[in-house]
Image (cartoon, grey):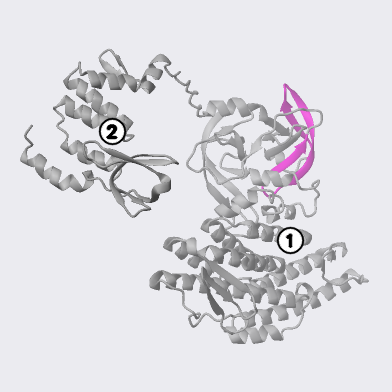
Amino acid sequence: MRLSPLAVALAVLLSPLLAFADRIFLKDGRVIEGEILSQTDKEVKISIGKHGAALTFDLKQVEKIDRTAASPEQLYDGRLLLCDRKNPDALVTLADWCAKNGLTEKAALHYVEALGLLPDHARARGRLTEMGYREVDGKWLSPKELEKLANPPVEPVKPPEPKVPTSEDVAKAQGPSVAAVWAKDAPGVGAWATEDGLIWVCGRAAQGSQQLEVDFEGRKWQARPVARDRVRGVALWKVDGVHAKPVRPFYGALPERDPLVALTPEGVMGNVFARGWERVSAEVWVVKIEGVQGAAAVFDLKGELLGLSGDGKTAVGAIDLARLRRMGAPAPEGEQNAAGSFWRACDLAEGPALEMIRTGSRLDSFDPGLGADDIDRAQSLARDLARLGKTLKGDVDDAVAALRLARHLARAGRVSFSLAAAEILEAQTKTIAEGLPRLSPAQLQRLRATVEGLGPDPAGLESAATGEVKRLESITQGAKEAKSLLDLQISGFPILGPEPVESLEGGVAAMYDVVHEAQEFAMKVRAACSRPDEARRTDLDALPAGPGPFRDFATLRARAFGAMTARTALRIAIRLREIRADSGSYPSEVPSGLEDPATGRPFEVHLESRGFRLVAPSGAEFRVRE
């Protein structure tokens, strides 16, 4: 058989691949070249390519074995190019070589290919039969295909597609959780809060009345008040002797794009849409809704209660309803102040508050709204918010949320909130610094903008001074109009000290003296905070303890300086990270203009194998790890 010029050229080009190149180095110095056919733990067999001759050597004779031949897969490519695929014998020869070199599937492929040219080729048929193949309806099937033919797989039963709940489904499921309520012929809507008869009420029936009737299971039940929030127009009542189906409150971000379901006490259902939170007063936030008339309970398509609406235009959110369960029995005095926004952490610290902080819900315009009767609650609120702020340790979204929370606390005008802001900043700075190398340029820019937004007074020292004085003025004015001094002796905030006063007039006069002293002290704090870094440090350090809420001013000042140091450390770390992105390495010194505001001295940079360590003049350390 004559080879075409193309085949000859291919043979020349592929000869290095087809050449035998395995070598056995014997201990007597000889080197045997060829193709290793087999090897065991005792001997090795090599073909030397001369008329099929092969040599076998005991491994005790062998110094080393050099397998430098191309792999069977590589040799196969060359042999396939040289094979005359129109010749069944050539295909069988190629298939034999494949089988000998462990390319079983390719061997079967070429035996079948040969039978396509010559169906009675004895060797091809015999070899396929030895390999377990069988001819079925003119097609050669592999052992796996024969097994599948004999035992066809059972088609898995696909589970039904989950049904997307509809408004009708929600109405049917949650209808028993909604009840009509009446107070002196004033209608309202109620939603069961617990199985044992606590019910949230919204609408005219929630305003002021001490008697309430609830339509439930075909009869009218008498209820008694538990807690009331007249500012928001909601109340919590108790119906004794019932076993109700409670709702599941919804605390997450508002589903403003998805339709909601409104259920009226009469069972009328309608689709509504949430349009975001609306601030209607210093303390009150409501959900704007549209699509419903009159009182209704608003659910999402999961059947969770979003809120209660008394007018069909706004709804009191489930977070405010949940707060009612922690309030005591309503009383004429302080009832509206009890609706202060301390619930944002104290009442929801077990989970929903974290989600609210992450999404920024209601925190963009943080206003504690705490009055004179909320002094003790302010302390617990500050502690809870500080704990929640330090809990945020996830991605850049959590970092930004924590810093924003600290900023809102710093602007709240309370000493306790300023201390909480400083605590969050100091803890978060170390957490954020460690994760800086993992941030993308866009995330880094977003973090930078948030840090810059904290301002030069990140703990809100000036705001705390101003806010506390305004609160003292408000309390003093209230005391002037009061009939007794009982509300002036407040635990945790001794305005007049522990000594009792002899008369109302004397107590008010003494309070005005404290207010004047506090006003003068706050003016000094504000003046110091408005000055450049060095003068600010000097003036603040010179201030002694102040009156009333400023008696522990040294602690507030120290924490405020600590917050300034933490903010500057973040600014430096972000800047160094940006320098590394541009130049490929971290600088060994802090760029000028980024000195510690608390001391006026520069930070130190200690380069490490996987990042750097930033040391403040106070000794505080912040690590950035690659």
Relative height, residue 210 to residue 169 (above, below) = below
Residue at x 61%, y 87% (from the top left corner): 535
Residue at x 72%, y 60% (from the top left corner): 383
**Residue 345 quadrant:** bottom right
Residue marked by disc 2: 98
Q: Nearer the viewer, residue 343 or 156?
A: 156
Relative height, residue 342 to residue 300 (above, below) = below
Q: Nearer the viewer, residue 561 or 190?
A: 561
For badge 2, the amino acid type reads Cys
Residue marked by disc 1: 378
Q: Is residue 116 left or right of residue 428?
A: left
- Which span is picked out in magenta? 210-238
SS at mark 2?
Answer: helix
Q: Is residue 212 left or right of residue 366?
A: right
Q: Provide residue 425's location: percent of width, then percent of height.
A: 62, 67
Q: Nearer the viewer, residue 86 or 256?
A: 86
The answer to whether residue 250 is magenta is no
